[in-house]
Amino acid sequence: MKASRIAILMSVMVALVAMTGCFKRPAIRLERAGGASVVIHVETLGEYPTTIRHIEIKEISSGKVVFDLLADSGSPQIYNFRLIAGENPTRLADPEHGSYRVDQPRGKDTFTLQKGARYRLTIWGEGWPPSKTDVQF
């Protein structure tokens, strides 16, 4: 009887540990880089690349998605990326491993962020819930 209780307890503990990874959100830190520029940091412990599988930038007032980047192969890991008011390259994240594909804007090499507009930046890591922050230039 004791052995079965221990086995059940161990199973519950293993399940809880496995689930904690499902709920882990990537850390986001914004660094104003002068003028109308911001560096988005997603490093783990401030120095290690983080697996980022999806980045979305949405204009808050209209709800329009202006940029959408999705993991394409492997587990793309990045440290940070820079956003500026004006034209931004769609290949703004240079992964250390894996690759990304641009879903929005389709077929373009750049996307535009307007000065004065507010944007919602949503980033998904390995876990299910995303991290969100607002950015304004």
Image: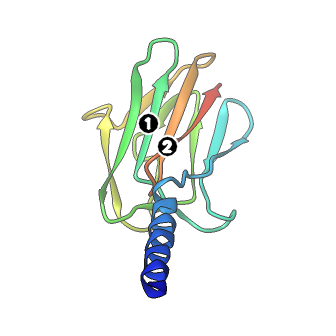
- Give the residue at x 45% y 87%: 3
Look at the numbered disc 1 and give the secondary structure of its residue: strand
Q: Which mark is residue 94?
A: none
Q: Which of marks 1 and 2 is in front?
A: 2
Residue 63 lies left or right of residue 46; in this view the side is left
Tell which residue pokes out farthest to the front in this image: 1
Specify whether 28 is left or right of 33: left
| Marks 1/2: CA–CA distance | 10 Å
What colour scheme does the image use? rainbow
Quick one: quadrant of the N terminus? bottom left
**Residue 39 or residue 131, whichever sits in front:** 131
Q: Which amino acid does label 1 sit on?
A: Glu
Residue 47 against residue 63 in the figure, above or below: below
Q: Position of residue 84 (x, y in %)?
A: 59, 33
What's the residue type where badge 2 is placed? Pro
Figure check: 38 above or below 66: below
Q: How crowded is mark 2: few (under 14 residues within 10 Å), some or many (20 or more)?
A: some
State how many labels appear: 2
Q: In this view, does 93 lie to the left or right of 84?
A: left
What is the crowding at mark 1: few (fewer than 14 residues within 10 Å), some, or many (at least 20)? some
The disc label shown at residue 130, or none: 2
Q: Mark 1 points at which residue?
A: 56
Earlier in the chain: of badge 1 and badge 2, it is: 1
In the rendering, at what x and y percent does residue 97 appear?
40, 68
Q: Label 2 near label 1: C-beta < 8 Å?
A: no
Task: Name the residue at the left extreme.
Answer: 107
Q: Using the rendered view, name the quadrant where residue 64 is placed.
A: top left
Which residue is painted at 44% across and 57% down in the image?
Answer: 126
- Residue occupying the point 40% across, 61% down: 76
Query: Which part of the image, by quadrant, shows the C terminus?
Result: top right
In percent of width and height, residue 11 lies at: 43, 74
Of all residues shown, which one is farthest toward the bottom?
A: 3
